[in-house]
């Protein structure tokens, strides 16, 4: 039933590790996004994919690599995790330009 | 100047009160506008889109003033369940459906 689902919901790991977060949407949307919300609650876009093609990359370190195997999935792989990566990561999807985005319930990443 | 600016609040209001939030945006090419609601430790949820002519959804009314580049949200007859952070969201334009989120205005409705 869940429209935009992310896994895992919580991720606690050590500095230097590599981890992945998965996202799937069953809304039939053609565009998917990754956002980061930091401790100050500021929500900022990281990446956007439209039909498996990267269309937004907001000056994110290249340790972050999104992958979209199909338009219903957008995964985020993070290499060499750093303390500053601790945040909530939200996946979202939409039909396209000027349309509202629907969010998953977030992945809370904590780096020890 | 921030792309989207909001008063962070908190706005503490009694149940039944009317409360209004404003938001300003800096990019005159912005094309679409939204209000989202975010509860503590939850995902942002779309409250309503904002149209040039203004629009209403039950107790919620949104207005857009393109000339002054501001957006407003009015909540009438506040309920305890309205307590949340309200995010002003602007599409930057230029393709890619790139949304810029304000930092949010916190509302606390009290008995």
Image (tube, rainbow, N blue to C red):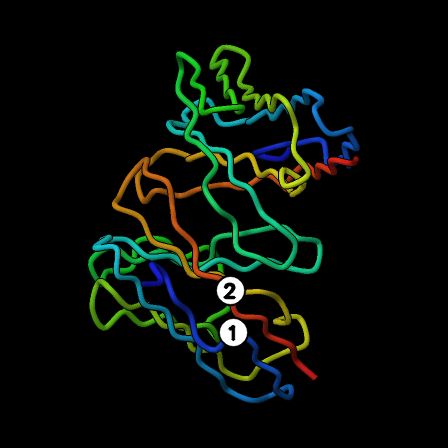
Q: Secondary structure at mark 2?
A: loop
Residue under the point 31% across and 48% down: A94
Q: Up-down: is A13 above or below B51? A: below
Where residue B32 appears, x then y in whole percent? 39, 29
Question: Closest to the observer: A97 or B72?
Answer: B72
Chain holding disc 2: A
Chain holding disc 1: A
Residue under the point 48% across and 46% down: B45
Question: Closest to the observer: B76 or A58?
Answer: B76
Question: Closest to the observer: A89 or B4?
Answer: A89
Gap between marks 2 and 1 measured at Cα: 6 Å
Give the position of the C terminus of chain A as an image quadrant. Answer: bottom right
Residue A36 picture quarter: bottom right
Q: Up-down: is A106 above or below B109? A: below
Q: Secondary structure at mark 1?
A: loop
Contact between labelled residues 1 and 2, with CB atoms less than 8 Å apart:
yes
Where residue B15 appears, x then y in whole percent? 73, 29
Residue under the point 57% across and 51% down: A43
Q: Up-down: is B110 above or below A111? A: above
Quick check: A8 left or right of A40?
Answer: left
Residue under the point 42% across and 61% down: A91
Quick check: B49 left or right of B95?
Answer: right
Say which label, 2 or 1, has the lower sequence index.
Answer: 1
Where residue A11 appears, x then y in whole percent? 57, 80
Q: Which residue is mark 1?
A: A9
Where residue A95 appears, x then y in whole percent? 25, 46
Residue A106 numbered tag: 2
Give the position of the N terminus of chain A as an image quadrant. Answer: bottom left
């Amino acid at each position: 039933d869940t429209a935009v689902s992310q896994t895992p919901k919580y991720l606690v790991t050590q500095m230097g590790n590599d981890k992945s977060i998965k996202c799937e949407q069953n809304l039939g949307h053609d565009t998917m996004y990754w956002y980061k919300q930091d401790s100050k609650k500021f929500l900022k876009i990281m990446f956007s994919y439209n039909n498996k093609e990267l269309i937004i990359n907001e000056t994110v370190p290249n340790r972050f690599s999104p992958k979209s195997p199909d338009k219903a999935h957008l995964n985020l792989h993070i290499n060499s995790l750093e303390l500053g990566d601790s945040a909530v990561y939200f996946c979202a999807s939409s039909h396209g330009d000027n349309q509202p985005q629907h969010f998953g319930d977030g992945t809370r990443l904590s780096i020890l | 100047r921030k792309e989207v600016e909001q008063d962070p609040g908190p706005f503490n209001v009694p149940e039944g009160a009317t409360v209004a939030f404003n938001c300003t945006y800096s990019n005159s090419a912005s094309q679409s506008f939204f209000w989202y609601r975010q509860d503590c430790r939850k995902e942002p949820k779309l409250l309503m889109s904002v149209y040039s002519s203004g629009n209403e959804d039950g107790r919620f009314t949104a207005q857009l003033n393109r000339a002054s580049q501001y957006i407003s949200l009015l909540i009438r007859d506040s309920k305890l369940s309205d307590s949340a952070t309200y995010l002003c969201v602007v599409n930057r334009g230029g393709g890619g459906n790139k949304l810029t989120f304000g930092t949010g205005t916190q509302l606390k409705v009290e008995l």
